[in-house]
Amino acid sequence: MATQFLPYLSRDLTKLLENKKNYDFVINVDKEDNKKEFCVHSIILESRSTYFFRNSLSNGFTKKENNIYILDLPDISVNVFDIVIRYIYGATIDLDREAPADILNLLVACEKFKLKELFDYIQDCLINHHQYWVFQNFVLIQQVSFQYNEFTKLQNYWTTTVGEQPEILFNATDFTSVDKDTLLTVYRDGDICVKESELWDHIIHWGKAQNTELTEEISDWTTNEFNILKKTIEDFIPHIRFYEISPEDFCYKIMPYCGVLSSELYQDLSKYHLVPNWQPIFNNLKPRKKDLNVSQISNISNIINLPNASTPNSPKTPNTLNSPITTNTLNSPNTTNTLNSPSSPNSYNSQSSNKFFSSFNVYSAYIPISNPPIESKLIDGEQALLISSWIQGNNEIEIPIKYGKVYGFKLLARGSRDGFTSASFHKLCDNKGPTITILKLKDESAIIGGYNPTSWEINKHGEYERTSDSFVFSLGKEIILSRVRKYDNAIYQSNRGISFRDLQLIDNFNCEQGVYYTHNAYSRKIHDPGYFSAEEYEMFSIFLYSP
């Protein structure tokens, strides 16, 4: 029986790369400001990446000077190429400390070098360990993954997620860059579990973003501005079930944009809401289904207008990913182990996914389970379970008899333990994904708090996060759930602390004016307005809980 000592081979070949002895190939990577020269060996490059080596010599991009090949790769960053070339020499890869943006760029680079054994491994890493970043950059994931036939795991993941949870697409930070055909097919063919008024909000937001000349203040618009928006979104109008929109939403959301609707439709909608027993003329769409089965989800795969698969001469995705998101840990091989299998037992498939968010389904087909454990001085397991149901879309102040998945709460920070300063909060809670804030005010018994479905990030100071999923609440004698109504002002990123726009924890939270509340961006008032002091606060990240 043969004995293998592959780690030693890996170590020695990597030293050859580092020592630069007898090299005959120079690869210059990145743009001018960050440009770096890598000295490599053509025999290793040809052996480990035959396609890339031969293609680079035949396409005319490689020069030869003094018996040294010279190739420029400006679209690959120094960090990404360093990972690639170390894998080529040593057959090891460690993504533990890599930002998810670099991991996606690495996937594209591996396609360039035809390192096919890494395709599934890297896709699994993004899906299983950087899901929040994937959701935040969901359109980018679509654009990159469907450019290459080999990225099937990301393609399937994107397609299934859109079919089951279209709100992930709507809430992505790059939502407005989604192409029209993709978005139109989601509206037309997807039995999406999203309120019609929210679908209207999303398409207005998308349509305005396609026309930078349109101002936010529509009171200043002329007929010309409305016609521009109308032309942009007119293909979506027939697929919105306007007659399912409440009178209140019709008044505050539809009427301000009546100029984008046909006069016949707008008049009929007005009569529908104003005239008792009015029989609508244009109400010819069936209600959307509330649950998706597997066959319906598979139909969503038709929403992508696929470009031709990339060829050696086709343009590559620009290397413009610069996310500061902190990475999660991936148990990838270390420098003494070779990569034997790109698959992991938790890798995604089309039948089951390790998705973070639950869909907004009607609470059915799930049996209640015991309260999730929670390390809290302020709320108990039953209250945590109620908040969990609110995250999934329950609007009641009681836990439904049947409900979807349950979230566990992981304590990130507690004022009495970690301090009440904004600095300690950002140190412990930034870049942790969706979180729940729990707060007890001094000299009061009520517990108030809020849900941030995005992530706290100090480096985004001064920016608002747009989301339709955040809410604030009160767990006093009267339980109050208040969902966001002004999506563009839902979450405010501040270096001074925590801000749900209405509910703010500022600088030193336990000082006399460390907490501020006003009623503005959220639907219901949860407390009297004014300045207060925090007696205790807790911050939790959330995760899917299995008993």
Image: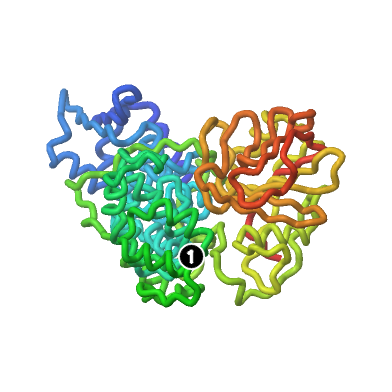
Q: What secondary structure is found at the residue carrying circle 1? A: loop
Disc 1 residue type (three-letter): Ile
Front residue of this view, candidates 199 and 270: 270
The quarter holding residue 39 reads top left
* 277 over 503 or under it: above or below: below
Report the residue at 60% width, 62% height from top: 393
Which residue is at 57% across, 42% downward? 491
Q: In this picture, is 279 found above or below 39?
A: below
Identify which residue is drawn at 18% across, 44% down.
55
Say whether residue 281 is left or right of residue 449. Answer: left
Q: As displayed, is residue 307 above or below residue 517?
A: below
Q: For the view shown, which residue lies furthest in the right direction?
A: 443
Q: Residue at x 29, y 23 (%)?
A: 32
- Residue 86 visible in rendering: no
Image spot of residue 315 (x, y percent): 21, 44
Identify the residue position indicated by label 1 in the image: 245
Rendered view: 496 above or below 489: above
- Outermost residue on the front side: it is 275
Residue 139 visible at all: yes
- Where does the image place residue 316, in percent across and percent down from the top left? 25, 44
